[in-house]
Amino acid sequence: MVEDWAERSCEANDRCLQDLFRTVLATSAQLPPEQRLVMYDGSDEAARATLGPLRKRLDARRNTKPKKAAVQLQVCTPFDPHGFHFGKIRNEGERLLRLRLAGGEYQLLTNKFPLFPSHMLLVASEEVPQL
């Protein structure tokens, strides 16, 4: 089902996103690491350090994240339907929501290694180059 995001209030949409994240996080916590859709909640202050006026995420758990292939090190690359892209879903549970926005149809996906609380991925349903 595709939800028309604009038909609901911002508060209702915020609650929906937070509830989705909390649910998938709680479910993942009960599974062995190789089956988790989200590894941790990304909210622990111990993983942050103050660097002058800036704050930087210093989370050793992200070191368990698979490294990108050398051909994907540049941000702007032509779309390769045979290479990695967010439309290749291995586990349907990764797709939390399908929604319609002004620019088209999008999917809300889990982020296995979140940088901050409720960090998820909003991905266009159409195959487009990464910019």
Image (cartoon, helix red, strand yellow):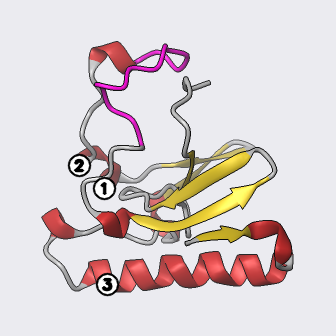
Q: Label 1's element?
A: helix
Q: Label 2's element?
A: helix
Which numbered disc covers residue 94? none
For label 1, the residue is: 61
How far separated are the C-alphas under marks 2 and 1? Answer: 6 Å
Rendered-image quadrant of the C terminus: top right
Magenta-colored stretch includes residue 80: yes
Q: Give the residue type at disc 3.
A: Thr
Residue 51 position, x and y percent, is 62, 43
Rendered-image quadrant of the N terminus: bottom right
The residue at the point 75 percent across, 68 percent down is 5
Q: Quadrant of residue 27?
A: bottom left
Residue 21 position, x and y percent, is 50, 76
How far separated are the C-alphas under marks 3 and 2? Answer: 20 Å
Q: Give the residue type at disc 2.
A: Thr
- Contact flag, marks 2 and 1 (Cβ < 8 Å): yes
Can you tell which of label 3 and label 2 is closer to the viewer? 3
Q: Give the residue type at disc 1.
A: Arg
Evaluate whether residue 39 shows in this view: no
The residue at the point 76 percent across, 44 percent down is 103
For label 2, the residue is: 64
The residue at the point 70 percent across, 59 percent down is 100
- 130, 74: nearer the viewer: 130
Q: Label 3's element?
A: helix
Evaluate whether residue 47 shows in this view: yes
- 127, 30: nearer the viewer: 127
Measured along the vertical axis of the image, is residue 87 above or below residue 121? Answer: above
For label 3, the residue is: 27
